[in-house]
Amino acid sequence: MTAHLMFQPDQARQLQTCIHCGLCLPSCPTYMVTGREADSPRGRLVLMNSIDRHEWSDRSGHFVHIDRCLGCLACETACPSGVPYGSLLEQVRSFQRREVTPLKLGSRTILRWTTAPVLRRRLTRLLAWLQKLRLDRLAVRLRLLPRPLRMQLAGLPKLPAKSFTAAAEQRFEPRHPEGIHRETVALFAGCVMDSWFANVHAATVRVMQWNGYTVIVPAGQHCCGALHAHAGIDTATGAKGERVGDMSAFSQTGAAALIVNSAGCGAHLKHAAADGLPQVVDAVEWLVDNGLLPPVHKLPEKVTYDAPCHLFHAQKIVQQPEALLRAACENLIPLPESEVCCGSAGLYSLTEPDLSRQILGRKLAMLEKVDAEIVATANPGCQMQIQGGLKLDGQRRQVRHTLEILDAAYSLDETYRRVFAE
């Protein structure tokens, strides 16, 4: 009997369900760029099997192609055999970090400074200072930094004065003038979303209130651990006391659902859901499935939608974002290859900058083709990646969260503006 190096017997059997049909190849962003079998899901599954059975000698050669995987899960959508590629990939990366090559210092540093609360506050203050003095624009214009860092600076939103969450629990009551009251929901604030995209949380709360929901934002929230899982880091041993993945803040809320507006966080939390927590639901999914109140007026601008991988492929949320945008937008233009990854993928744009740039280039070409004024998406990494790429490419388009667009459509109604001005 063959001894398995990485996988449990049931996982090894899952690996063997791949029938090597090749239907995943056209859906894989890295295969689209390189055309190499080893950079396709089918090829990576062969490499995983080789590693698991000890049939390998060149560690770096095998893991180069594993490292190039975005983890977008488009292959799972395409696979007729239902191979659970995502869970197998996480297992391989966890083994890689433990037994082969630890996460590089630069990547570990970025993880710490973006997910640890104290360090993230310091980083946010520094970046806000750079924005205030417009030094970020100068660094981008004069090319004072490597391109991946310039693109991150260019894609960074205008940082808010403070995070969305407060020291004490926040509670937002329904605000519809007709007195509509529905369930109570809890909002997951996250880490980067809380510090850098507080405006998205504010828009999320407003549209929830308008639709009749009470929104609880518990204090003491922590990073969900999605970035760590994608990098192969075990949060139980790799978070160094930062309580990554600790969801205890939501255990006593009594909420009907835990609402998430970041696709990556939502996919991770659904996968790692713990007992005693409310059901995890994407905010757009919740609104549309429970009867979205349509805006009185629609936005006149041309809008197109880029589907985040961890919304479309991981959570299988396909129809709801488009239904919401059709309700909010006068001119919604379909985006070719909307479901294809933009090349962000957590730390990928920094660890694999060349491939990330080529994958993004394909996305930017599609955006130039449809010529929309606003690009809607629903993940912070996607928003920064696409916005940064657009700026460096000279395209003047805004990238906004789907719920910001709904909030903007509602805001065309004087009643909505008056209610939330009070």
Image (cartoon, rainbow, N blue to C red):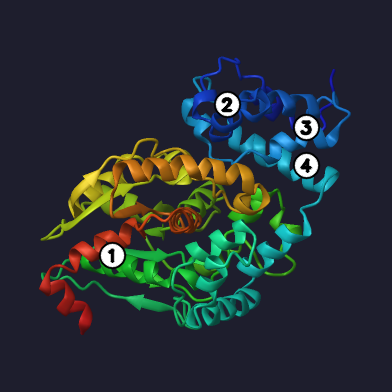
- Dot 1 amino acid type: Met
Q: Is residue 239 left or right of residue 251?
A: right
Mark 4 or mark 1: whose residue is earlier in sequence: 4
Please state which of residues 138 and 115 is positioned toward the viewer in this rendering: 138
The residue pinned by badge 2 equals 83
Q: Position of residue 257 (x, y in %)?
A: 39, 58
Q: Which mark is residue 62?
A: 3
Q: Which type of secondary structure does the marked residue at label 4 adopt?
A: helix
| Residue 190 visible within the image | no
- Dot 2 amino acid type: Val
In this view, the residue farthest toward the front is: 142
**Considering only vertical position in the picture, is 199 above or below 95?**
below
Q: Which residue shows up at 58% across the image and 34% down it? A: 30
The residue pinned by badge 4 equals 95
Q: CA distance from mark 2 to mark 1?
A: 37 Å
- The mark lying in front, picked from 3 and 2, is 3
Mark 1 or mark 3: whose residue is earlier in sequence: 3
Q: Which type of secondary structure does the marked residue at label 2 adopt?
A: loop
Q: CA distance from mark 1 to mark 3?
A: 47 Å
Please state which of residues 95 and 171 is positioned toward the viewer in this rendering: 95
